Image (cartoon, rainbow, N blue to C red):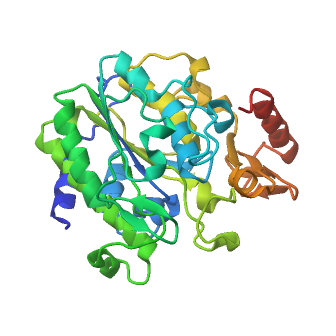
Amino acid sequence: MRTHAILVLCILSSCSGEESLSSASKPKNLLLVSFDTTRADHLGCYGYEEAHTPILDSLAEHGVLFENCFAPAPITLPSHASLLTGLRPPTHGARNNATHPLPKDIPTLAERFQREGFRTGAVVSALVLDSRYGLSRGFDLYDDNLSSADLVEDFMIRETTASDTTSRAIEALKQLGEGPWMLWVHYFDPHAEYIPPEEYLKLCPGRPYDAEISFADDQLGVLIDAIRSKGFIEDTLIAMTADHGESLGDHGERTHGFFLYDSTTRVPLILSSPTLKKERKANLAGTVDIAPTLCSLMGVPFKDTDFDGFDLFANSQESRQPVYQESMVPFLNYGWSDLRAMRSGQTRFIRSPKEEFQVFGEDPWTRDKLSKALDEVLVSGDR
């Protein structure tokens, strides 16, 4: 189970350089990995001492880790739509799982890479990311085959296991050829219900959620090892994030989908490549920033106006706006009030019938400033 983890750590160590972005050549290939339902504070590289995540910890140790990255929504489709478009949910329009697919006129990251000559592939592990919901545009290969999936009856969803996802991803690599390629791989395992293989429960006794993350981490190591065996590792940028977190009982919420606290919106963001200098970055980031950042790192042209997000390595980050967040499930599924929020580095304003202003430390973004910034986002478009 762990033999490849040591190998991958050595690979990443030997590939990790100290050169700046400007002095190193750009990667040839991109592996974009999204873990479903994964809290940043349940990974070892984010300080969780009980974690068993050696692969992600190694990626972080030899790459760039963003300590304060936030998702725009606490559910899968809207958050992945932002990941793959660089747009906030009010802009891209995919506001809910299943009922609100990504509109056909919204350009995707895969389409941008495809235009630049990349072979593009995706392997997803849950029905909510089926091609019918709009994220498949621009992918030469979009594997949403869930024929081997198990039905999680309490949640009425189908999911494939991490080992099956990895096998399909390795097959996708074969089809993508020698590159340049972009491959997005989605691991659904940390999503409830938490039913990991027994060996991972032994690693995380009494913590099945952590065991699911450990299982996905281990299988990511298998995938990275396959990339190494094909001779691609030194030419590949690996980007890992999550669509949202999990409450685990925080604020009285069992799983996710309703509230906009850090439990369900603070997610990991790790970038690892020989072209990147090792660094832990404390500045504010959002998953909406990933698309422009990857375009910049991979040499895919774009205009700043193409995205709501920002290139996380650009100097303009110093004057960036807070991260927009929303929870539309209460309104769209139950007829209750929706929640809208703006998250700065150390404050968050949540607009709802009972407004909240959270302060985590010193920050120039006051309640009034965040409220005004939220108004500006909503005025610019609420699709």
- Name the residue located 69 percent from the left edge and 51 percent from the top edge: 327
- Name the residue located 80 percent from the left edge and 42 percent from the top edge: 370
Q: Is residue 192 left or right of residue 103?
A: left
- Name the residue located 16 percent from the left edge and 43 percent from the top edge: 228
Q: Is residue 110 above or below residue 358?
A: above
Q: Is residue 283 left or right of residue 350?
A: left
Expressed as whole percent of the image width and height from the top left, the position of residue 79 reads 56, 45
Expressed as whole percent of the image width and height from the top left, the position of residue 47 reads 47, 64
Say which of 147 and 322 sits in front. Answer: 147
Expressed as whole percent of the image width and height from the top left, the position of residue 156 reads 50, 64
Q: Is residue 308 above or below residue 77?
A: above
Question: Which residue in the rendered view is the most extreme toward the bottom?
Answer: 206
The answer to whether any part of residue 65 appears in the image is: no
- Name the residue located 69 percent from the left edge and 35 percent from the top edge: 90
Expressed as whole percent of the image width and height from the top left, the position of residue 16 reads 27, 41
Displayed quadrant of residue 201: bottom left
Q: Is residue 262 left or right of residue 25?
A: right
Q: Is residue 334 left or right of residue 75?
A: right
Q: How many marks?
A: 0
Quarter holding the N terminus? bottom left
The answer to whether any part of residue 110 appears in the image is: yes
Displayed quadrant of residue 18: top left
Q: Is residue 99 above or below residue 182?
A: below
Q: Is residue 255 above or below residue 130?
A: below
Quarter holding the C terminus? top right
